Image (cartoon, rainbow, N blue to C red):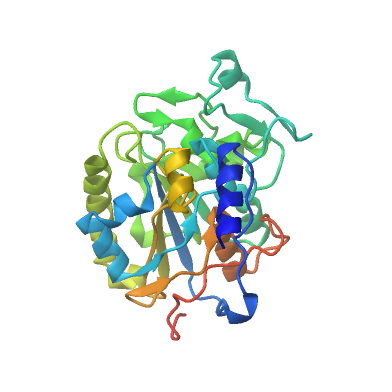
Amino acid sequence: MLRALIACALAALCSCSTGPIARNEGAAPQFPAHPFDHFVLIVLENEDAATIERIPYMDSLARDGATLRAYFAVAHPSYPNYLALVAGRTFSTADSNVTHDPAAYEARDFGDAQLLIDAPTIADRLESKGLTWDAFAEDYPDTTAAPTSCFFGRARGHYARKHVPFLSFAEFHRRPQMCAHVRNLRWFNRDSLAAYTFITPNMIHDGHDAPMDSAVTWLRGFLAPILADSAAMHSTVIAITFDESGSSFSDRFRRGNANRVFAALIGGPIRRGADSDFPVTHYGMLRTVEENFDLAPSLVPANTRAIVGVWNATAP
Protein backbone atom coordinates (compact mmCIF):
# COMPACT_ATOMS: atom_id res chain seq x y z
CA MET A 1 0.00 0.00 0.00
CA LEU A 2 2.84 2.41 0.87
CA ARG A 3 4.40 1.83 -2.55
CA ALA A 4 1.07 2.60 -4.23
CA LEU A 5 0.60 5.78 -2.20
CA ILE A 6 4.10 6.96 -3.11
CA ALA A 7 3.33 6.35 -6.79
CA CYS A 8 0.12 8.31 -6.45
CA ALA A 9 1.98 11.21 -4.83
CA LEU A 10 4.61 11.32 -7.56
CA ALA A 11 1.97 11.21 -10.27
CA ALA A 12 0.01 13.99 -8.58
CA LEU A 13 3.06 16.23 -8.46
CA CYS A 14 3.46 16.10 -12.22
CA SER A 15 -0.28 16.35 -12.97
CA CYS A 16 -0.34 12.81 -14.35
CA SER A 17 -3.19 10.32 -14.30
CA THR A 18 -3.22 7.82 -11.46
CA GLY A 19 -5.29 4.69 -11.63
CA PRO A 20 -7.02 3.19 -8.62
CA ILE A 21 -4.71 2.14 -5.83
CA ALA A 22 -4.01 -1.58 -5.78
CA ARG A 23 -5.90 -3.73 -3.32
CA ASN A 24 -6.84 -7.36 -2.89
CA GLU A 25 -9.77 -7.58 -5.31
CA GLY A 26 -10.99 -10.82 -3.74
CA ALA A 27 -12.00 -8.94 -0.59
CA ALA A 28 -13.88 -6.17 -2.39
CA PRO A 29 -17.69 -5.95 -2.19
CA GLN A 30 -19.59 -5.65 -5.44
CA PHE A 31 -21.37 -2.63 -6.89
CA PRO A 32 -25.16 -3.23 -6.75
CA ALA A 33 -27.48 -3.09 -9.75
CA HIS A 34 -28.69 0.49 -10.37
CA PRO A 35 -28.75 1.80 -6.78
CA PHE A 36 -29.82 5.36 -7.78
CA ASP A 37 -31.84 7.26 -10.38
CA HIS A 38 -30.20 10.66 -9.84
CA PHE A 39 -26.57 11.56 -9.10
CA VAL A 40 -25.55 15.07 -7.99
CA LEU A 41 -21.82 15.87 -7.75
CA ILE A 42 -20.68 18.99 -5.85
CA VAL A 43 -16.99 19.88 -6.11
CA LEU A 44 -15.23 22.18 -3.63
CA GLU A 45 -11.62 23.35 -3.66
CA ASN A 46 -8.16 22.65 -2.33
CA GLU A 47 -8.39 21.13 1.16
CA ASP A 48 -6.94 18.08 2.86
CA ALA A 49 -9.37 15.42 3.98
CA ALA A 50 -8.10 15.63 7.56
CA THR A 51 -8.91 19.35 7.71
CA ILE A 52 -12.45 18.92 6.40
CA GLU A 53 -13.20 15.93 8.62
CA ARG A 54 -12.67 18.17 11.67
CA ILE A 55 -15.39 20.63 10.61
CA PRO A 56 -18.59 19.77 12.53
CA TYR A 57 -20.99 20.33 9.64
CA MET A 58 -18.91 18.27 7.21
CA ASP A 59 -18.58 15.53 9.80
CA SER A 60 -22.36 15.57 10.25
CA LEU A 61 -22.84 15.12 6.50
CA ALA A 62 -20.54 12.14 6.58
CA ARG A 63 -22.40 10.60 9.51
CA ASP A 64 -25.76 11.14 7.81
CA GLY A 65 -24.44 9.37 4.73
CA ALA A 66 -21.25 7.50 3.90
CA THR A 67 -17.62 8.52 4.24
CA LEU A 68 -14.97 7.45 1.74
CA ARG A 69 -11.89 7.31 3.95
CA ALA A 70 -9.46 6.47 1.13
CA TYR A 71 -10.61 8.84 -1.60
CA PHE A 72 -7.89 10.52 -3.66
CA ALA A 73 -7.62 13.28 -6.22
CA VAL A 74 -5.50 12.40 -9.25
CA ALA A 75 -3.41 15.48 -10.10
CA HIS A 76 -2.22 18.98 -9.29
CA PRO A 77 -3.21 21.75 -9.94
CA SER A 78 -7.02 21.86 -9.85
CA TYR A 79 -7.97 21.76 -13.50
CA PRO A 80 -6.91 18.20 -14.45
CA ASN A 81 -9.00 16.83 -11.58
CA TYR A 82 -12.14 18.41 -13.02
CA LEU A 83 -11.39 16.84 -16.39
CA ALA A 84 -10.89 13.47 -14.72
CA LEU A 85 -14.26 13.70 -12.99
CA VAL A 86 -16.21 14.12 -16.25
CA ALA A 87 -13.97 12.52 -18.89
CA GLY A 88 -11.80 9.95 -17.12
CA ARG A 89 -8.44 11.47 -18.05
CA THR A 90 -6.34 14.46 -17.03
CA PHE A 91 -5.26 15.31 -20.62
CA SER A 92 -2.34 17.43 -21.81
CA THR A 93 -1.13 19.04 -25.02
CA ALA A 94 1.02 15.95 -25.56
CA ASP A 95 -2.20 14.19 -26.59
CA SER A 96 -2.97 14.35 -30.31
CA ASN A 97 -6.58 15.42 -29.67
CA VAL A 98 -5.69 18.31 -27.34
CA THR A 99 -4.59 21.88 -28.01
CA HIS A 100 -4.30 25.02 -25.93
CA ASP A 101 -7.55 26.85 -25.46
CA PRO A 102 -7.03 30.08 -27.43
CA ALA A 103 -8.33 32.41 -24.71
CA ALA A 104 -6.31 30.82 -21.93
CA TYR A 105 -3.14 30.67 -24.04
CA GLU A 106 -3.44 34.30 -25.10
CA ALA A 107 -3.81 35.31 -21.45
CA ARG A 108 -0.83 33.13 -20.54
CA ASP A 109 -2.85 31.37 -17.88
CA PHE A 110 -0.36 28.50 -17.60
CA GLY A 111 -1.10 27.45 -14.02
CA ASP A 112 -4.61 26.15 -14.64
CA ALA A 113 -4.64 26.84 -18.37
CA GLN A 114 -7.73 25.44 -20.03
CA LEU A 115 -7.39 23.08 -22.95
CA LEU A 116 -9.47 22.44 -26.05
CA ILE A 117 -10.09 18.69 -26.08
CA ASP A 118 -11.65 16.57 -28.79
CA ALA A 119 -12.81 13.66 -26.65
CA PRO A 120 -16.07 12.35 -25.16
CA THR A 121 -17.37 13.14 -21.68
CA ILE A 122 -19.97 11.64 -19.39
CA ALA A 123 -22.48 13.94 -21.16
CA ASP A 124 -21.97 12.02 -24.41
CA ARG A 125 -22.44 8.68 -22.69
CA LEU A 126 -25.62 9.82 -20.97
CA GLU A 127 -27.11 11.24 -24.15
CA SER A 128 -26.33 8.03 -26.02
CA LYS A 129 -28.59 6.24 -23.53
CA GLY A 130 -31.32 8.88 -23.70
CA LEU A 131 -30.53 10.07 -20.16
CA THR A 132 -30.61 13.66 -18.94
CA TRP A 133 -27.74 15.70 -17.52
CA ASP A 134 -27.00 19.21 -16.29
CA ALA A 135 -23.99 21.28 -15.25
CA PHE A 136 -24.74 24.23 -12.97
CA ALA A 137 -22.18 26.91 -12.17
CA GLU A 138 -22.76 29.66 -9.65
CA ASP A 139 -22.41 33.11 -11.29
CA TYR A 140 -22.20 31.61 -14.79
CA PRO A 141 -22.48 34.74 -16.98
CA ASP A 142 -25.33 33.47 -19.18
CA THR A 143 -28.37 33.62 -16.91
CA THR A 144 -30.98 32.41 -19.40
CA ALA A 145 -32.93 29.25 -18.60
CA ALA A 146 -31.79 27.40 -21.72
CA PRO A 147 -28.66 28.96 -23.26
CA THR A 148 -28.29 28.63 -27.02
CA SER A 149 -24.51 28.95 -26.87
CA CYS A 150 -21.78 28.54 -24.28
CA PHE A 151 -19.86 31.29 -22.52
CA PHE A 152 -16.23 30.31 -23.12
CA GLY A 153 -14.61 33.23 -21.31
CA ARG A 154 -12.00 32.24 -18.74
CA ALA A 155 -13.53 34.16 -15.84
CA ARG A 156 -16.00 36.85 -14.86
CA GLY A 157 -16.38 38.11 -11.31
CA HIS A 158 -16.27 35.09 -9.01
CA TYR A 159 -16.96 32.66 -11.84
CA ALA A 160 -14.09 30.60 -13.32
CA ARG A 161 -14.48 28.44 -16.43
CA LYS A 162 -11.76 26.03 -15.34
CA HIS A 163 -14.22 24.68 -12.75
CA VAL A 164 -16.80 23.87 -15.44
CA PRO A 165 -14.89 21.11 -17.23
CA PHE A 166 -17.46 20.44 -19.96
CA LEU A 167 -16.54 23.76 -21.56
CA SER A 168 -13.06 22.44 -22.35
CA PHE A 169 -14.44 19.95 -24.87
CA ALA A 170 -14.67 20.65 -28.58
CA GLU A 171 -18.15 19.22 -28.87
CA PHE A 172 -19.53 22.21 -26.99
CA HIS A 173 -18.15 24.41 -29.76
CA ARG A 174 -19.45 22.17 -32.56
CA ARG A 175 -22.88 21.45 -31.07
CA PRO A 176 -24.31 24.59 -29.43
CA GLN A 177 -27.36 22.58 -28.35
CA MET A 178 -25.14 20.98 -25.71
CA CYS A 179 -24.84 24.42 -24.12
CA ALA A 180 -28.48 24.33 -23.02
CA HIS A 181 -27.31 21.98 -20.25
CA VAL A 182 -24.64 24.36 -18.91
CA ARG A 183 -26.50 26.89 -16.82
CA ASN A 184 -26.35 29.37 -14.02
CA LEU A 185 -27.00 27.76 -10.64
CA ARG A 186 -30.15 29.81 -10.18
CA TRP A 187 -31.90 27.26 -12.45
CA PHE A 188 -31.17 24.28 -10.24
CA ASN A 189 -34.46 22.65 -9.19
CA ARG A 190 -34.55 19.66 -6.87
CA ASP A 191 -38.01 18.78 -8.22
CA SER A 192 -36.68 18.13 -11.71
CA LEU A 193 -33.30 16.48 -11.21
CA ALA A 194 -31.50 15.10 -14.24
CA ALA A 195 -29.98 11.64 -14.13
CA TYR A 196 -26.60 13.34 -13.64
CA THR A 197 -25.91 16.84 -12.27
CA PHE A 198 -22.53 18.53 -11.89
CA ILE A 199 -22.44 21.56 -9.56
CA THR A 200 -19.63 24.04 -9.02
CA PRO A 201 -20.00 27.00 -6.63
CA ASN A 202 -18.26 30.27 -7.39
CA MET A 203 -14.66 30.94 -6.33
CA ILE A 204 -15.78 32.23 -2.92
CA HIS A 205 -18.24 29.49 -2.08
CA ASP A 206 -16.00 26.63 -3.21
CA GLY A 207 -13.29 27.69 -0.76
CA HIS A 208 -10.76 28.73 -3.41
CA ASP A 209 -10.70 32.49 -2.78
CA ALA A 210 -12.08 32.61 0.75
CA PRO A 211 -11.76 30.73 4.05
CA MET A 212 -13.42 27.33 4.17
CA ASP A 213 -16.11 28.79 6.45
CA SER A 214 -17.55 30.48 3.35
CA ALA A 215 -17.81 27.15 1.53
CA VAL A 216 -19.34 25.38 4.53
CA THR A 217 -21.96 28.11 4.98
CA TRP A 218 -22.86 27.98 1.30
CA LEU A 219 -23.03 24.18 1.28
CA ARG A 220 -25.24 24.10 4.36
CA GLY A 221 -27.68 26.57 2.81
CA PHE A 222 -27.69 24.83 -0.56
CA LEU A 223 -28.19 21.33 0.79
CA ALA A 224 -30.71 21.99 3.56
CA PRO A 225 -33.88 22.11 1.39
CA ILE A 226 -32.73 19.19 -0.75
CA LEU A 227 -31.92 16.91 2.17
CA ALA A 228 -35.23 17.82 3.81
CA ASP A 229 -37.13 16.65 0.71
CA SER A 230 -37.56 12.92 1.32
CA ALA A 231 -39.25 12.39 -2.05
CA ALA A 232 -36.33 13.97 -3.92
CA MET A 233 -33.75 12.07 -1.90
CA HIS A 234 -35.37 8.63 -2.11
CA SER A 235 -33.50 7.60 -5.26
CA THR A 236 -30.88 10.39 -5.30
CA VAL A 237 -27.22 10.33 -4.33
CA ILE A 238 -25.41 13.57 -3.57
CA ALA A 239 -21.63 13.34 -3.66
CA ILE A 240 -19.53 16.07 -2.03
CA THR A 241 -15.81 16.10 -2.68
CA PHE A 242 -12.81 18.34 -3.33
CA ASP A 243 -10.77 18.72 -6.49
CA GLU A 244 -7.37 18.28 -4.79
CA SER A 245 -5.71 18.41 -1.40
CA GLY A 246 -4.32 21.66 -0.08
CA SER A 247 -1.14 20.65 1.73
CA SER A 248 2.38 20.71 0.40
CA PHE A 249 3.86 17.76 -1.48
CA SER A 250 6.37 17.04 1.26
CA ASP A 251 3.65 16.98 3.91
CA ARG A 252 1.48 14.62 1.88
CA PHE A 253 4.46 12.36 1.19
CA ARG A 254 5.51 12.24 4.83
CA ARG A 255 2.04 11.31 6.06
CA GLY A 256 1.38 8.76 3.32
CA ASN A 257 -1.84 10.53 2.33
CA ALA A 258 -0.96 11.62 -1.19
CA ASN A 259 -3.73 13.93 -2.42
CA ARG A 260 -6.38 12.43 -0.13
CA VAL A 261 -9.54 14.54 -0.15
CA PHE A 262 -12.84 14.48 1.70
CA ALA A 263 -15.62 12.59 -0.04
CA ALA A 264 -19.09 11.84 1.32
CA LEU A 265 -22.21 10.35 -0.26
CA ILE A 266 -25.70 11.18 1.01
CA GLY A 267 -29.12 9.97 -0.06
CA GLY A 268 -31.73 7.28 0.17
CA PRO A 269 -29.59 4.64 -1.58
CA ILE A 270 -26.70 5.21 0.87
CA ARG A 271 -26.33 3.26 4.11
CA ARG A 272 -26.30 5.87 6.85
CA GLY A 273 -23.07 6.02 8.83
CA ALA A 274 -21.23 3.73 6.43
CA ASP A 275 -17.45 4.02 6.20
CA SER A 276 -15.50 2.70 3.24
CA ASP A 277 -11.73 2.34 3.31
CA PHE A 278 -11.59 0.83 -0.16
CA PRO A 279 -9.20 3.08 -2.14
CA VAL A 280 -10.89 5.07 -4.88
CA THR A 281 -10.04 8.17 -6.95
CA HIS A 282 -11.96 10.70 -9.01
CA TYR A 283 -11.97 8.04 -11.71
CA GLY A 284 -13.93 5.78 -9.38
CA MET A 285 -16.52 8.51 -8.88
CA LEU A 286 -17.04 8.63 -12.64
CA ARG A 287 -17.05 4.83 -12.89
CA THR A 288 -19.84 4.73 -10.31
CA VAL A 289 -22.04 6.78 -12.63
CA GLU A 290 -21.09 4.63 -15.62
CA GLU A 291 -21.92 1.37 -13.86
CA ASN A 292 -25.17 2.64 -12.38
CA PHE A 293 -26.53 3.73 -15.77
CA ASP A 294 -24.82 0.97 -17.76
CA LEU A 295 -22.83 3.45 -19.85
CA ALA A 296 -20.29 2.23 -22.37
CA PRO A 297 -17.61 2.32 -23.50
CA SER A 298 -16.06 3.38 -20.22
CA LEU A 299 -14.15 6.66 -20.07
CA VAL A 300 -11.93 5.73 -17.12
CA PRO A 301 -8.65 3.80 -16.96
CA ALA A 302 -8.94 0.03 -17.21
CA ASN A 303 -9.78 -1.83 -14.00
CA THR A 304 -11.14 1.28 -12.27
CA ARG A 305 -13.62 0.18 -9.63
CA ALA A 306 -16.89 1.91 -8.75
CA ILE A 307 -17.55 2.96 -5.16
CA VAL A 308 -18.55 -0.04 -3.05
CA GLY A 309 -19.44 -0.91 0.52
CA VAL A 310 -21.80 2.02 1.18
CA TRP A 311 -25.07 1.05 -0.53
CA ASN A 312 -28.39 0.13 1.09
CA ALA A 313 -29.60 -3.35 0.29
CA THR A 314 -33.00 -1.79 -0.52
CA ALA A 315 -31.62 0.88 -2.90
CA PRO A 316 -33.94 1.35 -5.90
Above or below, 223 against 47 in this view is: below
Residue 262 visible, this orientation: yes
The residue closer to the viewer here, 170 or 313, is 313
Q: Position of residue 96 (x, y in %)?
A: 79, 34
Q: Is residue 60 left or right of residue 66?
A: left
Q: Position of residue 185 (x, y in %)?
A: 36, 43
Q: Position of residue 226 (x, y in %)?
A: 29, 61
Q: Residue at x 64, y 69 (%)?
A: 294
Residue 293, by quadrant, is bottom right
Residue 147 visible, this orientation: no
Q: Residue at x 53, y 20 (%)?
A: 109
The residue closer to the viewer here, 17 or 154, is 17
Residue 11, by quadrant, is top right
Total number of numbered discs in the rendering: 0
Residue 83, by quadrant, is top right
In the picture, the quarter occupied by the N terminus is: bottom right
Q: Position of residue 102 (x, y in %)?
A: 63, 20
Q: Is residue 97 left or right of residue 233?
A: right
Q: Residue at x 69, y 59 (%)?
A: 298
Tell which residue pokes out farthest to the front in this image.
254
Q: Residue at x 34, y 41 (%)?
A: 206
